[in-house]
Image (cartoon, rainbow, N blue to C red):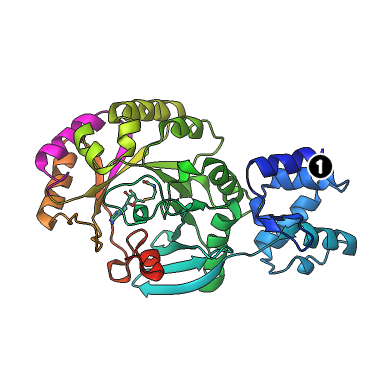
Amino acid sequence: MFDIILRNLFENSRIFSYNKDGCEIMNLYDLTIEELEDYFVGIGDKKYRATQVYEWLYRKRIHAISEMTNLKKELLAHLEEKFTLHTISLVEQQEDVDVRKFLFRLMDGEVVEAVLMRHVYGNSVCVSSQVGCNMGCKFCESGRRKKVRNLKTHEMVEQILLIEEIVGVRISHVVVMGIGEPFDNYENLVSFLHIINYAKGLAIGSRHITVSTCGIIPKIQEFMHLPYQVNLAISLHAPNNQIRDAIMPINKVYKLEDLIKILKEYIAFTNRRVTFEYVLLKGVNDSSLCAEELANLLHGMNCYVNLIPYNETSHIAFERSDEISIHNFQDTLKKRGINVTIRKEYGGKISAACGQLRSKKEGYE
Ligand code: SAH
């Protein structure tokens, strides 16, 4: 039994590192409550230990396994040998009105970004899901360096824990919109969602969690069958294949019409609204013709369009649309009955565009 659990964890590549004897060490923040229950049963202990451990991890926010004082000495020694806890650390942070950006270092020296945004409705964190990204969107800073590796579940969970600790606030909303393509790291993402949503985990309501993807169709199909009411956002950025092919290489694999078709199935099956993100790039996708075409494409769908003023970055030739074009684009969609807003801008002054802080730090700007 124990072997099977360990094998599953290995196959999901969720083992983190090795202890001094060369044994694999797992991270407690990697495990869902069920996995932890199975673990304790597997070593001949009681299932309810998992709940006790979760209490220490997510309520009392311990920093060392030895702080779990209601566990027997032998069990503590066992856990200390098999597991580790916190692995990420703060490298730097930048602050602007209502926004704070964090650069975190991972155990292997790689760095990722996370952003805290303060809204009237609560505190939201944008987490990264990978080191680098392979999707190659032409306008995006994160994709300038290819994917180095997927983030482990615990590295995503830790981004939230560390921000709560540094800032001293509770996070009520999570968006997986930082560096990386979450659906290219699907298994770790799903465990992460489970842990942060679980009442005795971080207890973040599923409707307060949003996953953003560039449109990996097979994963959207899997995602729609998950037992959580997590929101789905799609980085659309174009009203037709010609423009989307030119700026988002993923469109060569999963065509726009197929993406829209699966999203209609998703909406029908889940009864949930889909959000479309549309970054406005001057002279590329911001004409009134594009707005009309987008309205035709989304006609009748239970959806919401979030227009994103482009954050210009050095090295990337795209320009931000001017204010008039942005508002005209919005008006055209509105007139056609599409729910649309312009994204509130956070942190232009602090390199908040996805991947910018990491680029600066790593000197490949
Ligand atoms: N890979 C996922 C999530 C990460 S990107 C996805 O594609 O959805 C998060 C969002 O920021 C995407 O919509 C992305 O297209 C957008 N984005 C990337 N670079 C940007 C920039 N410089 N300015 C504005 N939005 C940007």
The image shows residue 46, relative to residue 93, as above or below, that is above
Question: Magenta part of the protein: which range?
Answer: 283-305
Q: Which residue is mark 1?
A: 2
Q: Position of residue 241 (x, y in %)?
A: 23, 32
Residue 330 covered by magenta stretch = no
Residue at horizontal 88 percent and vertical 64 percent from the top: 73
The image shows residue 28, relative to residue 294, as above or below, that is below
Q: Position of residue 14 (x, y in %)?
A: 64, 48
Name the image quarter holding the N terminus.
Answer: top right
Residue at horizontal 28 percent and vertical 66 percent from the top: 348
Nearest the camera: 279 or 360?
Answer: 360
Mark 1 lies on a secondary structure that is: helix
In the rendered structure, which amino acid carries the disc numbered 1? Phe
Few, some or many C-alpha atoms within 10 Å of disc 1 (few <14, some 14-19, many ≥20)? some
Q: Position of residue 128 (x, y in %)?
A: 46, 55
- Say whether residue 320 is left or right of residue 60: left
The image shows residue 169, relative to residue 54, as above or below, that is below
